[in-house]
Amino acid sequence: MSIRFRLALTLDALLLAALLTFGVIIYDSQKALLLRKAREARETTLKSLASVTAETLAGEDDGPLIAYTSGLKRMVRELELAYVSDGKFIIAHTDRKLAPRQLPLSSGGESMSAFSNRLLVRKTVAPDTAKGVSISRKRIVVKGQAYEVVVGFCDAKVSAGVEKALEAVLLSLLQAGLLVILAGTLLAFWLSAKLTRPIRTLAQALAATGAGDMTRQVGDTDRRDEIGVLNREFNRMVAGLREVDEMKRDFVSSVTHELKSPLGAIESYLDLMAYEIAQGKNDPQVCSLKIPKFLENINFIKQNSGRLLKFITDLLDASKIERGKFEITRRPSRIEPLISGAVQLFSERAKASGITLTARLQERLPQPMLDPERITQVLQNLISNALKFTPPGGSVTVSATLVRPERAPAGDGRRPDVTEGRALRVEVADTGPGVPKEALERLFGKFYQAPGSRGSAIGPKGTGLGLYIVKNIIEAHGGRAYAESNSGGRFGFELPV
């Protein structure tokens, strides 16, 4: 069932319930009003007859009273009977045959009350005792003589008049209700079309996005309702998907490069060595002269195979992190030899690039609980990145100090789990171009590379996994990794001691 139909059905149901409630209230109020008007008409007729009686009898001429009373039925449709009595005689009656006539007396001489559609004589009859007739009485005094004025309305005629009027009210209510439901249905379809239009637009955009179109955006993002929120979230989602798609393409390109480059270099050196061996296989002296060159080529092959092995190791580590299988083995270890070893490893590369690589270590550093192999991996990642983005003539400094949490630099907002309020901070600072501030918080994300970093990198471009692995290794130690950019880049980590 479509939203349009459901909205129309819901609105019609609400309107019908409201109309039924309103109709019952109107019907009851109209019925009460008509019955009240019938009573008022009886009282008005009684007052009118009493007034005519007083005026006529004051002139001692009952002819006009008799004529007026006998003609009342023609003027008042619901009137069943009306008469005027002085207690002994019926002076005037709607039935001319009954007036004037002397009232009968009981055997005990007690006066009797008389009323009927003709003339009923009953003892002490109440005003409303006559079956099917509602009686109203009024006692007046004219020239010292008391008179009783009686008016009776036929209940059946009153009810018939009320029912006829109520039928007209019901017909009007039914017509109005049909018009309201019709208008409500049209309004519901109009509203549903207006409400579902942006949903249909969003559905089309979702279908296009699912088909691979990452450029689709939806408008009405400035709306302050749920549709505006939905549109903004969709645009944000598409932007994120587009970024992930770009990261995926970059990653595929990086993987291709990281696999192809070292393999191509290894293949080239092996081909060269095979060619030279083939050329000098008949002359051992020539082959012996080429041994230093062969050793150099073997060294290049080893470097490229090491680069390939590191890349594969990073992929495996990232996979373990995603599956929650990443483990470390901590033991009390000194950080100084790990830093010295990492600096020594990259010293030749730094020298070849014209970069000064130094280490500044605080004396008597404590021995934190750490996994030496994993921390060495972290140090190598950070130093390699620093060398990659530092231009010739620049410098890279690796420092290690003991700090307290309140002095720790701003990073990802988490403090290390330190003992006695101390933390071992290791930082790699370079004099490169630095990192845009808006990219700092995302640097440790999987596959993420800061805008422009691929163009400014010297040597292999990387895959965006290094800092992601660094962050997870440090957090597995109960510490935190951070990044800052101020006159160059500063990447580091803090470990509890």
Image: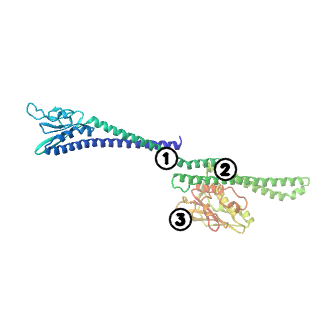
Residue under label 3, please give it. Answer: 406
Which numbered disc, 1 or 3, marks the residue that appears first in the sequence?
Answer: 1
Q: Do the residues labelled 1 and 2 touch (CB within 8 Å)?
A: no
Disc 3 versus disc 2: distance between alpha carbons? 36 Å
The quarter of the displayed image where residue 156 is located: top left
Q: Do the residues labelled 1 and 3 touch (CB within 8 Å)?
A: no
> Horizontal and vertical percent for residue 380?
67, 59
- Please state if 222 lies on the left or on the right of 81 as rendered: right
The quarter of the displayed image where residue 36 is located: top left
Q: Find numbered disc 2 in the image and state the secondary structure of the residue it sits on.
A: helix
Q: Residue at position x 23%, y 44% from top?
A: 44
Q: Residue at position x 40%, y 43% from top?
A: 19
- Please state which of the two labelled residues, at mark 1 or mark 3, is closer to the viewer: 1
Residue type pointed to by label 2: Leu
Q: Which mark is residue 187?
A: 1
The residue closer to the viewer here, 457 or 219, is: 219
- Please state if 71 lies on the left or on the right of 174 as rendered: left
The residue closer to the viewer here, 166 or 282, is: 166
Exactly how many numbered labels are in the figure? 3
Q: Is residue 30 above or below residue 267?
A: above
Q: Find numbered disc 3 in the image and state the secondary structure of the residue it sits on.
A: helix
Which numbered disc, 1 or 2, marks the residue that appears first in the sequence?
Answer: 1
The residue closer to the viewer here, 242 or 300, is: 242
> Horizontal and vertical percent for residue 468?
63, 55
Residue under label 2, please give it. Answer: 316
